[in-house]
Image: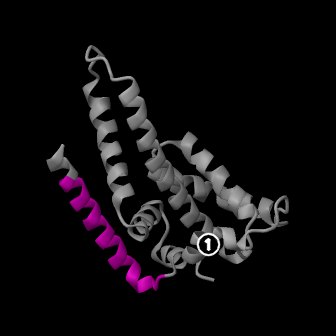
Amino acid sequence: MDVALSWDRKESVARSPGVVRPDLEQVFRTSYPRVVAVAARVLGSRDEAEDVAQEVFLTFGRSDVPAGEALPWLSVAAAHTALNHIRTGKRRAGREEAAHPRDATEPDVADAVVAREERRRVRAALARLPRRQAVALVLRHSGLNYAEVAAALGLSPGSVGTTVRRAESALREELNRHASSE
């Protein structure tokens, strides 16, 4: 089963409501740290990453994904779900900012603000990349080796390096494009 495809079709492989797979606890115990690490890499927040992990394991618990394919599936699901959280968070932040504009007299904490803004820019640019590139980049920079990234995305191990390099290049272009428009 192609892990990337099974994530996209998660509803079609779902178990009946209320039926939880018997291997969920074992898969959870062995895979939870990796799932949180992947989500945290995307989100920059362990608390938000744990929320994403919970959502991912709930989906996995109702799925028919074979236990042997659990870690790659969970890693891709964590990256996709975290990217979705970024997108929804940007929309929510925009609505909140429109409703309550910031006061110009807020104290200046330049270093923290610059670092936070840079991380926000990178995450926003990552969210604008094609899904496969964003997920490949996140998985590789979350510590997965080429073979693990290849298995998770249904690629040949030899094409992972090219995919990651193209994703890094696209990320740089996206950052440059939006830096010049700001």
Q: Quadrant of residue 112?
A: top left
Residue at x-position 37% and y-position 67%: 130
64 displayed left or right of 173: right
Residue at x-position 39% and y-position 56%: 127
Residue at x-position 74% and y-position 73%: 64
Asked if 159 appears above or below 15 in the picture, the reply is below
Residue at x-position 56% and y-position 59%: 78
Chief secondary structure of the magenta portion: helix
105 displayed left or right of 70: left
Q: Quadrant of residue 81?
A: bottom right
Q: Residue 152 placed where, x, y %? A: 54, 74
Return the residue nearer the eye: 57 or 18: 18
Quick one: quadrant of the N terminus? bottom right
Q: Residue 48 placed where, x, y %? A: 55, 43
| SS label for mark 1 | loop
Q: Residue 46 placed where, x, y %? A: 54, 43
> Can residue 72 be seen?
no
173 is within the stretch colored magenta: yes
Return the residue nearer the eye: 31 or 83: 83
- Identify the residue under disc 1: 9
| Label 1 environment density (alpha carbons within 10 Å; few <14, some 14–19, many ≥20) | few
Q: Residue 165 placed where, x, y %? A: 30, 72
**Which color scheme did the rendering employ for the protein?**
one colour
83 is within the stretch colored magenta: no
43 displayed left or right of 61: left
Q: Quadrant of residue 160?
A: bottom left
The residue lying furthest to the top in this view is: 105
Q: Which residues are magenta?
A: 155-177
